[in-house]
């Protein structure tokens, strides 16, 4: 019963994994510094928000086909937003592969300051 509540749908699986990742990040960052606490609390909050979204989808979609379709749409929107966040965060980072070097690369981080 508890496993079905945690793993009953794709959104629940995704949110459970996000919460586990957030707890791991919370444990690691708190042990080094407290400055990353807002970031990890945002991760945990987003995992809980996905559980709430799954509850609302389950409540308002009565047909199983519309329930699965709405879950797929929500998961695609989440994946697209994660992709956009990653792209905008790392847009200043450049990877350079020199022509004469073999299996070598130079990563130039876009640090503004």
Image (cartoon, rainbow, N blue to C red):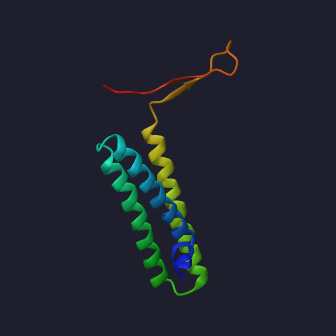
The quarter of the image holding the C terminus is top left
Residue 9: x and y in percent read 56, 74
With respect to residue 45, does 102 lie above or below? above
Q: Please state the horizontal and vertical placement of residue 35, each as a whole percent of the image.
A: 29, 42
Q: Residue at x 44, y 47 (%)?
A: 85
Relative depth, front residue between 53 and 65: 53
Where residue 55 sits: x, y (%)?
Answer: 44, 78
| In-image side of 106 versus 54 (left or right) | right
Left or right of 66 on screen, residue 27: left
Q: Position of residue 53 (x, y in %)?
A: 43, 72
Q: Residue furthest top?
A: 100
Residue with the most extreme bottom position:
62
Vertical arrangement, residue 84 with respect to residue 13, above or below: above
Identity of the residue drawn at 67% across and 15% down: 99
**Farthest-out residue, right:** 102
Q: Report the quarter where the N terminus lies.
A: bottom right
Task: Relative to 92, say whether 82 is above or below.
Answer: below
Q: Is residue 52 above or below residue 96?
A: below
Q: Nearer the viewer, residue 14 or 78?
A: 14
């Amino acid at each position: 019963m508890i496993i079905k509540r945690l793993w009953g749908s794709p959104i629940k699986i995704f949110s459970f994994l996000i919460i586990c990742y957030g707890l791991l990040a919370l444990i690691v960052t708190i042990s080094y510094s407290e400055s990353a606490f807002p970031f990890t609390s945002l991760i945990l909050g987003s995992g809980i928000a996905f559980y709430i979204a799954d509850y609302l989808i389950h409540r308002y979609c009565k047909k199983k086909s519309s329930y699965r379709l709405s879950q797929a749409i929500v998961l695609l929107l989440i994946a697209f937003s994660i992709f956009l966040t990653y792209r905008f965060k790392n847009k200043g980072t450049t990877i350079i592969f020199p022509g004469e070097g073999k299996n070598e690369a130079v990563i130039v981080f876009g640090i503004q300051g």
